[in-house]
Every structure is written in C-alpha cells, then in structure tokens.
Image (tube, rainbow, N blue to C red):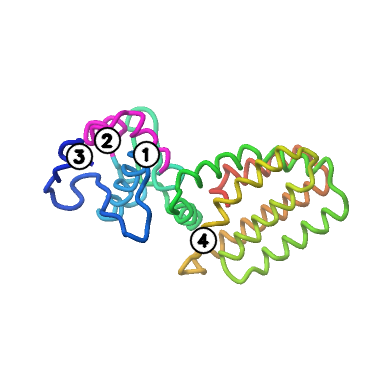
Amino acid sequence: MPHEAARRQGSGRPPGTTVSARTPDLAVPPPRTRAEQLAAGLDARIREQDLQTGDSVGTFESLRAETGFAYSTVSEAVRLLRDRGVLEVRPGRGGGLFVADRLPIVRLRHTLLAAPEPAAVADAIELRDHLEVLIDVAAARFHTDADIADLRVHLDRMGSAPNWDAFVRANWALHERIAAIGPNALARAVYLSTLGPLRATSTRFDDERAVAGYRAERHRIHVDLVDSIAAGNESRVRKLVARHNHGDREV
C-alpha cells in the first residue's frame, strides 16, 4: 500500500508489487480502517504471489516503510491477520512476519474473519477465550445431573452433525448450555454476547473430508471437557480449556 499521496493518484505498478486493497465488490462493505485495508492488501498479496507456509512477508519496519502508515496501524493489521491464522510473528534475529500454517481450522477462522465486521469477530473470539475458563470452572462447581444430561445431548448432536457448519453451530450451542450452569449472570451475559458475531457468519467448507480428522479431534476435546465438568475436576477443566483455546486453533 503506497504512501498516501501515491495512493490517491494511483501507483501504476503491476499487481503484486505493492500491498494494496482491491476495489471492493459493491455487495461487500469495504474495510473500515486503514489497518483493515492493509490487512486486506497483505492477504491479497499472499494469495496472488502464492506464498506458502513459512514464506516471509516482511517485518513490521519494512511494512511501515513501504506503506507510510504509522507503526500502530501496521501492528493492528498484523494482529488481524495473526488472529485470522494468516500470519505468524516470529521474534528475535531472523524473525519477522511469515505465512502461517493454513490448517483446516485456520481456514475456518479466516472465513469467520472475512465477514463484513472482521474486527468485531476477532474481538469476540478474544473475549470468549478469556472468559472460557471462568464459565467452564463454574459449570464444574455448580452443575446438576440434568445439566450434564443436556450437555451430553449437545455432544451427540456435534458427533452426528451432517457437515462442518452444523458441527460448529452444535459446538456453540454446547458452550451456550455450559454457560447457563454457573451463577455469575454478568459473566454469562458477556460470554453469550460473543457468540453473536460468530453465529452470524458462514463456516462451510467445500471439501468436508479435509476437515474430518480435525472435527473428530475437536469433538473428543469437548467430550473430555464435559466429562471433567461432570466429575467436578476443576484442574482438568482448566487444562482442557487451555488445550481448547491454545493447544489447537480453537473452534
């Protein structure tokens, strides 16, 4: 993305030589901020140049110099792409910005964050992750037998979901039911509010087979989580939440 004056006049360079957002489709709202414009341009560059996992995309300083944007704008754009699973940030000598491993679940997150309000979705994911341990530990403390029976019904729906989109939505319904158990009404309300931006997005994959193994793994994590809640094992619940949120790309 060229300096502001050049951006207004048009750079005249061939595609792929600058970080630039394309003219938006009229059916899709344009990015709202400069950071989102830069994120869209970087994402387009990666796809147009067919960059692969581990390929360098530059550094914070090189992007700042290339675009003329403030460091804070570049940093926010990188954060958006990191949250989408597009970029990996490596610190230290030889570090910088690199194309992340595009696992099926990373493509899911990319789909979620390609929604008309990508920043809202990223914020929802971040906030939900922070509240997850509070919500799930409370469920381990205060659940009833009826609660656990309901959670297992949701697990069965996840396991029998006909496709990835249905699986993810059954997953969110499970988490919503877990949130209903604890007594902290404020935490529950905030947690449930994070599901709104997620439910409003599509999560379909063209190749369901590509995500089958990951789907089975995620289902197993949730089965283990419900088992630990049922046992009142708070330590195990905390470990599973960490695995859910950070050990893998989370759903």
Q: Residue at x 34, y 33 (%)?
A: 73
Examine the structure image and report whether residue 72 is included in the region drawn in magenta: yes
Q: Residue at x 37, y 28 (%)?
A: 92
Q: Main secondary structure of the magenta part?
A: helix
Do labels 1 and 2 touch, CB within 8 Å? yes
The x and y percentages for residue 117 are: 45, 49
Q: Can you give x and y, in whole percent of width and height, for residue 19 in the image?
A: 24, 44
Looking at numbered disc 1 in the image, what kind of residue is underneath it? Ala
**Residue depicted at x 30% and y 29%:** 70
Q: Which residues are magenta?
A: 58-80
Residue holding disc 3: 2
Residue 229 on image: x %, y %: 78, 47
Between marks 3 and 2 in the image, the one whose residue lies nearer the viewer: 3
Q: Number of numbered discs present? A: 4
What amino acid is found at the position of numbered circle 3 in the picture?
Answer: Pro
Query: Does the magenta run of residues contain 226?
Result: no
* Residue 203 numbered tag: 4
Q: CA distance from mark 3 to mark 4?
A: 33 Å
State the CA–CA distance, disc 1 to disc 3: 15 Å
Which label is found at residue 77?
1
Q: Where residue 128 appears, x then y in whole percent?
A: 61, 42
Near-viewer residue (49 or 166): 166
